[in-house]
Amino acid sequence: MATKMKSKYDKYWGDIEKMNKLMYMDTVLDPNSKLIGVKIALVDIYGEKDAQPLFQKIKCAYDLSEEYRRVFALPVVIDENGVTSNSRATSSTVDSSTLMNLVTDRVKQRSGSQHFSRSEFDRYLDEERGDEEEKDGLTWWKLNSLRFSVVACMARDILVIPI
């Protein structure tokens, strides 16, 4: 029985070169672990020396997030008045606070604000990790899907894969 267990371990976790990188994406998309959780796990399993090059390969999550951004990002629409909006914003009336927010956002964009130059995936990773009391990552994604819409699409597609 131990031999059978060892062969299954080697098949799924033993050789990172052969392993499907989506196995680690579950940890990256867990708001309690994120990318630091993957790094800790790699160091624990493979040791400090071997973990560093492996961790660089796991950073394919950035490539995946960029692909999702290209597919799922909302197109930005600029009307004849120069007001920037997403295609989902279809309200015909704009109150003064919404207009002020749009102006503020455009000023930040033009001034090269770091918030707009960083990807949504980077903002997700840099945000404080979730509360330890909130163990349910799916609930966290449900509550935060508007803030991280593209990363939430990644989570929706990846977290349903049975491991």
Image (cartoon, rainbow, N blue to C red):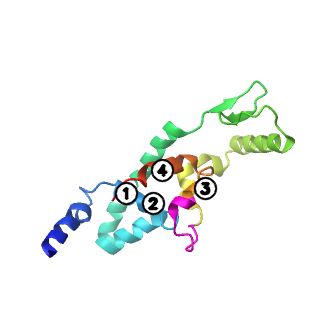
**Residue that mark 3 sits on:** 144
In the displayed structure image, the side of residue 88 where residue 124 appears, left or right: left
**Magenta part of the protein: which range?**
129-140
- Identify the residue shown where x is 45% and y is 41%: 67
Whether pointer 2 and pointer 4 mark residues with C-beta atoms closer than 8 Å, the reply is no
Image height check: is 142 above or below 66?
Answer: below
Front: mark 4 or 1:
4
Mark 1 element type: helix
- Identify the residue shown where x is 56% and y is 69%: 134
Residue 58, numbered circle: 1
Mark 3 element type: helix
User: Which numbered disc flags the more N-terminal residue, 3 or 4?
Assistant: 3
**Residue that mark 2 sits on:** 28
The type of residue carrying mark 4 is Arg
Residue 160 on image: x %, y %? 41, 53
Q: Going by the picture, which residue comes out furthest to the right?
A: 96
